[in-house]
Amino acid sequence: MTWRAGPGPAGTPADLAAARRGRRLLREELPRVREAALAWRNGLGALLLGLIGFGLLKGRTDVGALAPPYGPLVGALLLGALLCGAAGGILLLRAAHGRPAASTVPDPVPGTLPAGPVTAGHAEALRAARALTRGVVATVGCAALLTAAVALTWYGPAKEGPRIAVTTPAGTLCGEPLGTAGGRLRLKTETGERTVELPTAVALRAVASCGQQGQP
């Protein structure tokens, strides 16, 4: 059994108006996406510039002062922020200005017609919208990673300095040396600053940690 398609009913003025609206929306689709991409690019750029330029995101200047493994972790977060920021910037520029390539017109396949400008513009608008979405996500991820890295430099534990264990007849005192004056050694201990009379010291040795040392 053979089916043959015949002409449909004649279009009404409402159908013609709807078709015109659809074509107008397609023609205006790409400029709308480009305009939105420019707005997002400028807004996110200003946000990152404000966070960094005005010192809102500022931590320790030397991550080497952090106890391991927080120093390498901060470095990894900063590297991730750099990669996300670069990807976000490229994607936002792609969405706002298109690919940096010349336009090409494909050879029509025999028996078909090449895509018109409206169809090509719609395809480019879809690609630009995807690039815009990914660029916004990447840029927000850059800000989040940067904030996490700075937060670690704020709240990460500091690397422990040299410790000295001093043994006296009263017991053993361990802490970070702060200085000596008048035959007294000042130590910063877990319970606060303490002073040791050096003439009464029985033994004085450097230790890696005070965790196993007793307090008098």
Image (cartoon, rainbow, N blue to C red):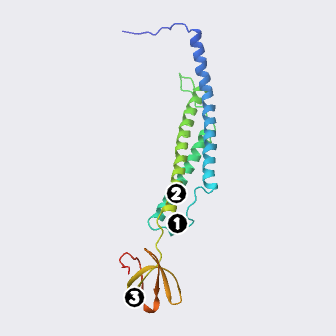
Dot 3 alpha-carbon crowd within 10 angstroms: few under 14, some 14 to 19, many 20 or more: some
Give the image location of residue 30, x and y in percent.
61, 31
Residue at label 2? 79
**CA distance separating discs 1 and 3:** 37 Å
Relative height, residue 63 to residue 79 (above, below):
below
Residue 116 in view = no
In the image, taking residue 33 as reference, residue 199 lies left or right, namely left
- Position of the C terminus, as image quadrant, is bottom left
Task: Looking at the image, tell me whether mark 1 or mark 3 is earlier in sequence order.
Answer: 1
Judge from the rendering whether residue 150 lies leftward or rightward of residue 167; answer left or right. right
Residue 183 appears left or right of 121: left
Residue 105, located in which quarter of the rendered image?
A: top right
* Marker disc for residue 168: 3
Circle 2 or circle 3, nearest the eye? 3
Cβ atoms at labels 1 and 3 below 8 Å apart: no
Q: Amino acid at mark 3?
A: Thr
Q: Nearer the viewer, mark 1 or mark 3?
A: 3
What's the CA distance linking mark 2 and mark 1? 14 Å
